[in-house]
Image: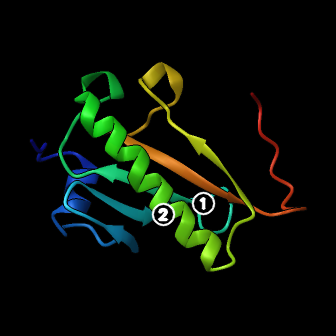
Amino acid sequence: MDNKDCVFCKIIRGEIPSTKTYEDDKFIAILDINPKTPGHTLVIAKDHFKTLLDTPTSLGCELMDAVKNVSLDLVKQGKAEGFNFIFNNGEVAGQIVPHVHMHILPRKSGDGLKMLV
């Protein structure tokens, strides 16, 4: 599935440039163009699903595997001591691009980022 006007689908097709940090058959990871922390990464499903609720359960589980792989790479590179994982699901929850993706915010001691829970 694909959406011709979706910015993430355009990135996946190579129509919009991005800094890719990971790719497998179902997901890509790119650096966020407006990072909240250094290394802020988006893990994006290659198939177009608007929200997690539209996504097959098996793909949701595989998304977490991709998030783990990207996170382990960030730790190995010395770019993170911990993480915030953010999944905005639906416009009311702050989802700007209606295409399933998860934010990985690498964290380091003293980075100054304040998170609300």
- If you read the primary sequence from the N terminus, does the residue marked by circle 2 or circle 1 appear first? 1
- Residue with the mark numbered 2: 70
Query: Which label sits in the foreground, 2 or 1?
Result: 2
Counting other residues with Cα less than 10 Å from the Cα at mark 2, is it few (<14), some (14-19), or many (20 or more)? many
Residue 61 figure quarter: top left
**Quadrant where the image shows the N terminus:** top left
Residue type at mark 1: give it.
Pro
Where residue 34 appears, x then y in whole percent?
56, 59
- Residue with the mark numbered 1: 35
Give the residue displayed 74% in from the left and 27% down from the top.
117
> From mark 2 to mark 1, how far is it between C-alphas?
16 Å
Give the residue displayed 11% in from the left and 45% down from the top.
2
Left or right side of 20 for 27: left
* Rendered position, 72 above or below 89: below
* Rendered position, 32 above or below 85: below
SS for callout 1: loop
Where residue 86 appears, x then y in whole percent?
57, 40
Give the residue displayed 70% in from the left and 67% down from the top.
80
Residue 94 in sight here: yes
Where residue 64 appears, x then y in whole percent?
43, 45
Query: Closer to the camera, 6 or 60?
Result: 60
Query: Closer to the camera, 7 or 78?
Result: 78
* Rendered position, 2 above or below 55: below
* Rendered position, 76 above or below 46: below
Residue 33 in sight here: no
Q: Residue furthest bottom?
A: 77
Residue type at mark 2: give it.
Val
Give the residue displayed 49% in from the left and 19% down from the top.
92
Where residue 51 appears, x then y in whole percent?
33, 28
Counting other residues with Cα less than 10 Å from the Cα at mark 1, is it few (<14), some (14-19), or many (20 or more)? few
SS for callout 2: helix
Left or right side of 17 for 21: right
